[in-house]
Image (cartoon, rainbow, N blue to C red):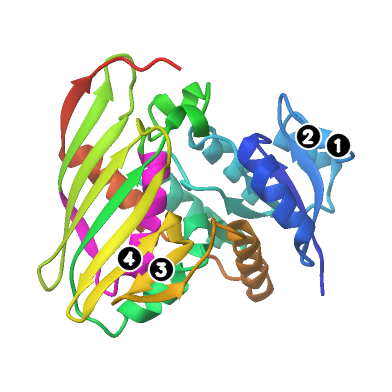
Amino acid sequence: MTVTEIAIAGFGKIARDQHVPSIARSDAFRLAATVSRNARADGIPAFGDIADMIAARPDVTAVALCMPPQARFGYAVAAIEAGLDVLLEKPPGASVAEVKALTRTAKAKGCVLFATWHSRFAAGVSAAKAWLATRRVLSARITWREDVRHWHPGQDWIWEPGGLGVFDPGINALSILTEILPVPVHVTDAELEFPANRATPIAARLTMYGAGDVIVAADFDWRQTGPQTWDIEVETDVGTLRLSKGGAEVEAAGRRLVAGEALQSEYDGLYSRFAHLLARRESEVDVSPLVHVADAFMLARRIETDPFHD
């Protein structure tokens, strides 16, 4: 098997906790370099700028971009123009137009572009999709509530334009929804709560509609303490499918399909998929979860709520 020399650009918590271990477990990749202004991995060559890495390491043929979405576009263009294949952390960009532009550039340069949605690789997602494929969906409900202070302490970028706010976790639920539903849906109504001192929402409620009069209600909130809630329920003509713990557990019509203690190996699956795409020289760029978020911002009624302080 050919081993791809890969770099990680943006060496923060998600890179250290998820990308590095999954690359280490993969037979298809070797971590060859990191790009970050402030952080590095022990024993791995580090660079402060992607141009410096590209110039110094011609053996590196792929890069995983893990910096905040506001800064990702410039790095992606530089990598693609240099002929590197690119993996984009979610969300794939700060806007839909950015991702479409990267798709065109990658195609023109013959590079593989992979816009990742790690939650789609949760243990129960494929089973939920298969079960729903032969059922008529009537409605669905998403409840995705967590504690921002636990998951994003001191990360001011997430509260700035392009940072998505509560949609940073919410888009994980939307990526699962768009993967498992057999019919497409679109946002028809939205209500977003913005802290008085922040530019992105801390809570959101969406209504979505699909063919066959399918109605989806979504409730995202970043103020939940204690146990976290990552649930999706889908009502069908033969019973209810319940996906819980972000996809670790799935129950359908009263029968347990998948059971797990916690989410495991999402990023292992993500890198397995990237290796598959590289072998076939194919790109995979699905912007549907990001489109739902963009539509929510366009359609939303804005509610100002209490200031948020870390």
Please state the extent of the stretch shown in magenta in the rendering: 167-188
N-terminal-most mark, 4 or 3: 4
Residue found 72% across the figure and 24% down from its top: 38
**Mark 4–mark 3 contact, CB under 8 Å?**
yes
Pointer 2 or 1: first along the chain = 1
Q: Amino acid at mark 4?
A: Arg
Please give the residue where the numbered disc 2 appears in the rendered image.
Answer: 52
Using the numbered discs, state the Cα–Cα distance from disc 4 to disc 2 in whole angstroms: 48 Å
Does residue 277 sit above or below 293 in this rendering? below
Secondary structure of the magenta portion, mostly?
helix
Give the label on residue 42, or none: 1
Distance Cα–Cα, label 2 vs label 1: 19 Å
Relative image position of residue 94 (x, y in whole percent):
43, 38
Point 36% across, 40% down: residue? 167
Q: Is residue 255 magenta?
A: no
User: What's the residue type where badge 3 is placed?
Assistant: Val
